[in-house]
Image (spheres, rainbow, N blue to C red):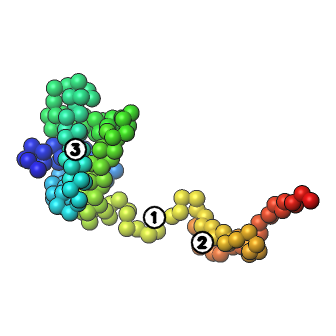
Amino acid sequence: MFGFERRWARDALSAFAPEQGPGLAPSAGEVDYDAVLQRMLREVAPLAIIGLRLAVWSAALAPLWLLGKFATISSLGSSHRPALLSALLTHRVFAVRELAMLLKLCAAMALLGVPSVRSRSGYDDARAAQPESGVRIRLPKSREEQVPLRVWPAQDGALTEVELEREHTQAAS
């Protein structure tokens, strides 16, 4: 990548979680977006390299083709970059949304690759990873199997058996 492409990429990736912003909010210099992008470019297939570079160019020139401003993402103020990325992520054209999502994936890998940011996110905390519904269910393997449904409530982890009522349909003779 050329120097200007690296600058565009750094400015785009850092806009997904701005410094001193809400959420993960890395401090200045805490996340090395350049290193993560360079590693991805080194490790991926040639077609993915084209996709990554196209994603960088798409985001970098988005002020021109999306907002009608004669600017790049680097020349926009850092407070305007997250809104620009949000517009790309919700664009009506699928390819534009996917290229922006590829950049977001790179930013997430860079953010979660830093132990201090990852610990603030709670990513590694098993207690915080509760099932969304609060209940785990194991269903019988076949219709003929007459075992009760087993349910594990997320709060206390105790196994509870629940009987299911099954509809029996009679075949017409």
- In the displayed structure, 98 sits above or below 129; it is above
Q: Give how far apart the Cα atoms at labels 3 and 1 are.
A: 37 Å
Residue found at x 23% / y 39%: 59
Whether residue 77 is visible here, answered yes or no, is no
Circle nearer the N terminus (2, 1): 1
Residue that numbered label 2 is attached to: 156
Q: Residue type at mark 2?
A: Asp
Which numbered marker is on residue 97? none
Please tell me in which quadrant of the rendered image residue 138 appears: bottom right
Q: Secondary structure at mark 1?
A: helix
Circle nearer the N terminus (3, 1): 3
Of badges 3 and 1, the one in the foreground is: 3
- In the displayed structure, 88 sits above or below 46; it is above
Residue that numbered label 1 is attached to: 128
Q: Secondary structure at mark 2?
A: loop
Do the CB atoms of the residues marked 3 and 1 lie less than 8 Å apart?
no
Q: Secondary structure at mark 3?
A: helix
In the image, residue 28 lies at what x, y percent? 17, 52
Residue found at x 33% / y 60%: 120
Residue found at x 54% / y 58%: 132
